[in-house]
Image: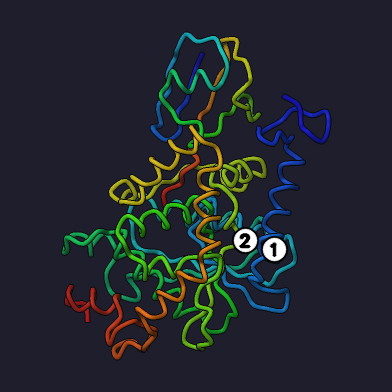
């Protein structure tokens, strides 16, 4: 799975299967601070990931 | 999971809404906030303090959509690798949605950018920036009835906690969905149409409508006390949903008592240098400018 973390401007390739909430736990990201996108669609925390998706993790905090 | 109101896929949980029902619910909440707190009406002229960030673009977009008379004011503090990008975002947004805005800068007003100022002082850049921005917003809003800002539920919960932790009752009394209630033609009333909307839902709204697709973060933001409080509040919210709303609702229930304490502690004067509202003889902005030998 390819994961782009917008705030850090980092792309990671990781082996993962589970739901969105578990992915965020694995990456140590608080779900309150992000929204998750795959194929331009918003994913909710309960959605299952098969492991071959391209995921974007957008930061909620603009800090400006 | 499916939307609570139709068969489409949800984009948000608790409550579960699809894209269309989330957008509808979000805009209704802004409209309800405007009415609940009597922020402004359709005959009034509204100046939106805009940074080009998600919050102020959301305010501009919704107010225009609801038929209010809006214009944006962007303050260019002079922060390299940040402000130029948000000005680009703002220009693009302004053309796309036909919303007018003007830019006023620290450089033009104070002959110095925030980047330059931070090299000459040990004061927190967010503190200086906030003081100067408030002064310019007030100065350039005289012909408007209200200044609408993009302050949201997260901002307000953070401010309440920050002022409690620093025991600043006077500053606590200046919070709320509407400030500057005293009849005074020197001070433009400030209102917060996103007062009850969370930062996460605002980001979702801007993503779904394509209002803001680039990520911009002020390089000074990580140095602020607010940033520490924001991290802590998000951790609490994740463990106990509703924490931020509970803090703000508790404040609203006690706002009248808190306002009375604030009124006793500070009264409005005019700064003898710039003639803008001030709690002392010299306003905070002029105090800093004097210290920096800029006036």
Q: Which subunit holds the residue at mark 1?
A: B
Q: Where does the image place residue B291, in percent across and percent down from the top left?
A: 17, 75
Secondary element under disc 1, as helix, strand or loop, is helix
- The residue tagged 2 is B60
Q: Residue at x 45, y 38 (%)?
A: B236
Drawn side of residue B112 relative to residue A33, left or right: left
Residue placed most toward the observer, A62 or B1: B1
Task: Identify the disc placed on residue B64.
Answer: 1
Q: Nearer the viewer, residue B237 or A12?
A: B237
Q: Is residue B196 left or right of residue A61?
A: right
In what element is the residue under mark 2?
helix
User: Can you say whether B18 is above or below A4 in the image?
Assistant: below
Instruction: Work out whether A17 lies above or below B40.
Output: above
* Residue B253 position by quadrant: bottom right
Density class for disc 1 (Cα within 10 Å; few <14, some 14-19, many ≥20) is some
Q: Are marks 2 and 1 in contact (CB under 8 Å)?
A: yes
Which residue shows up at 63% across the image and 30% down it? A42
Q: Quadrant of the C terminus of chain B?
A: bottom left
Q: Residue at x 28, y 49 (%)?
A: B223
């Amino acid at each position: 799975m390819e994961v782009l973390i917008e705030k850090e401007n980092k792309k990671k390739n990781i082996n993962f299967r589970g739901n969105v909430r578990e992915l965020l736990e694995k990456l140590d990201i608080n779900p309150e601070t992000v929204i998750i996108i795959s194929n331009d669609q918003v994913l909710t925390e309960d959605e299952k990931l098969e492991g071959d998706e391209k995921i974007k993790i957008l930061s909620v905090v603009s800090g400006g | 999971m499916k939307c609570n109101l139709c068969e489409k896929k949800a984009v948000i949980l608790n409550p579960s809404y699809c894209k269309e029902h989330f957008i509808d619910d979000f805009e209704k909440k802004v409209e309800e906030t405007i009415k609940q707190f009597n922020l402004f009406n359709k005959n009034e002229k509204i100046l939106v303090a805009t940074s080009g960030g998600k919050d102020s673009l959301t305010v501009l977009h919704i107010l225009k959509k609801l038929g209010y008379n809006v214009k944006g004011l962007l303050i260019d503090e002079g922060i390299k690798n940040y402000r130029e990008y948000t000005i680009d975002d703002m220009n693009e947004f302004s053309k796309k949605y036909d919303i007018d805005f003007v830019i006023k800068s620290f450089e033009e007003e104070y002959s110095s950018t925030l980047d330059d100022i931070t090299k000459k002082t040990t004061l927190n850049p967010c503190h200086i920036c906030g003081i100067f921005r408030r002064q310019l917003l007030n100065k350039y809003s005289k012909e408007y009835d209200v200044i609408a800002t993009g302050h949201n539920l997260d901002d307000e919960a953070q401010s309440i906690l920050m002022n409690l932790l620093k025991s600043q009752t006077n500053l606590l009394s200046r919070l709320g969905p509407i400030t500057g209630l005293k009849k005074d033609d020197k001070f433009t009333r400030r209102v917060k149409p996103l007062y009850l909307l969370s930062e996460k839902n605002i980001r979702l709204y801007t993503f779904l409508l394509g209002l803001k697709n680039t990520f911009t973060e002020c390089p000074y933001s990580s140095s602020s006390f607010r940033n520490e409080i924001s991290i802590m509040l998000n951790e609490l919210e994740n463990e106990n949903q509703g924490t931020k709303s509970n803090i703000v609702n508790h404040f609203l229930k006690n706002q009248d008592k808190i306002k009375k304490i604030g009124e006793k502690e500070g009264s409005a004067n005019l700064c003898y240098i710039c003639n803008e509202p001030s709690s002392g003889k010299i306003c905070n902005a002029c105090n800093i400018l004097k210290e920096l030998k800029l006036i």
